[in-house]
Amino acid sequence: MEPGAFEVAPGVYRIPLPLPNDGLRAVNVYAVADGEELVLIDSGWALDEARDQLEQALGSIGRGFESISRFLVTHVHRDHYTLGVQLRRTFGMRVSLGIGEQPSLEAILNGRVQGQLADLVRWGAQDMADRMRRAFEKAERAGERDGARREGYEQPDEWIRGTTEIRLNSRTLLALPTPGHTAGHVVFLDQESSLLFAGDHILPHITPSIGFELVRQELPLGDYLASLRLVREHPDMRLLPAHGPVTDSTHVRVDELLDHHRRRLDETERALGSDEATAADVAGRLGWTRHNRKLSEMDGFNRMLAIGETSAHLDVLVRDGRLRSSTVDGVARYRA
């Protein structure tokens, strides 16, 4: 990841900031010149290294933290939200977030993981639920219940409600709710400049995780596919994603993602076969990542993501009448 501020359109700069894991190396923050001010779309993770790199990148275009008037955040995940909240404490800029993120943010701030525990049980991953519960109880005993706040989570200044025009000094952005990756994910369209600030909704090389949230949508993959089609209804624009390079066509990538999930639905149905099985069972029969890894080869967190994604696909298959499901003692089982 090369640090700096890279102009991707007149007055729009991509600023990659570091992430503390071996999966995604960086998150793209976009600085939009707005007269004498800057509006940043997403903010990065509240890490010292990320803060330093953001400060240096802004300095390279003759700006500083005091130039930022506002953060427009695509969703509540910490690599998009928490550095903006941290900087707000010192510099007072506004932070805006989609209203659909409110339940998840409340759960984060209050340390509530019951929804995820129930989801893991529903998916047939009782062992994972037990490990998560023990880890949470250990943190409580250690007096770490306020850990989420220390990581940078606070309420935003403004909730973005529905499809909304956001009028800046020099341009107008259209905030478009795109639930799926999270319940309150929002993308921002600069229609005059033909730019789509896509957050994690549309990524150029990978598919965003679907289905493992503190407060889960009823049908997260169904929401995600509908959100992709909603974006596809707008004119094609340059894709400015939160992870990976800027590309020239949003439509091309949306079509690829829709095709990927069509194929994945078929694969999931075949993996179930004639058995009655849980989401965890089916996830264990599927290949994961571009390397077709087995579920057992993945770390615990990515196994949870994979099982949640499998559940999301199975639930769409049920909605579409291709499978049936029943729930006994909180565990969902699927059958042809």
Image: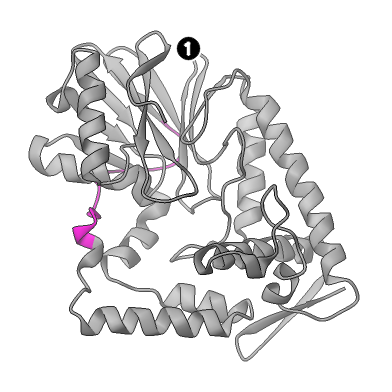
Query: Horizontal and vertical percent for residue 177?
Result: 49, 41
Left or right relative to 284: residue 276? right
Mark 1 nearby-residue class (10 Å; few <14, some 14–19, many ≥20): some
Residue 65 appears in the picture as rendered = yes
Front residue (pair 225, 50): 50
Residue in the image at 71% along x and 60% along y: 313
Q: Magenta span has 156?
A: yes
Query: Which segment is the magenta one?
Result: 149-164
How many marks can you see?
Answer: 1
Q: Mark 1 points at which residue?
A: 193
Q: Residue 14 at what x, y percent from top left?
A: 39, 23
- SS class, disc 1: loop
**In the rendered view, would you say 30 is above or below 116?**
above
**Which residue appears at 49% of the width and 36% of the height?**
243
Percent x, y of residue 148: 26, 63
What residue is at 67 percent from the left and 46 percent from the top? 225
Does the segment drawn in magenta span residue 291? no
Quadrant housing the N terminus: top left
Report whether 266 appears left or right of 92: right
At x 52% / y 79%, what residue is drawn? Answer: 128
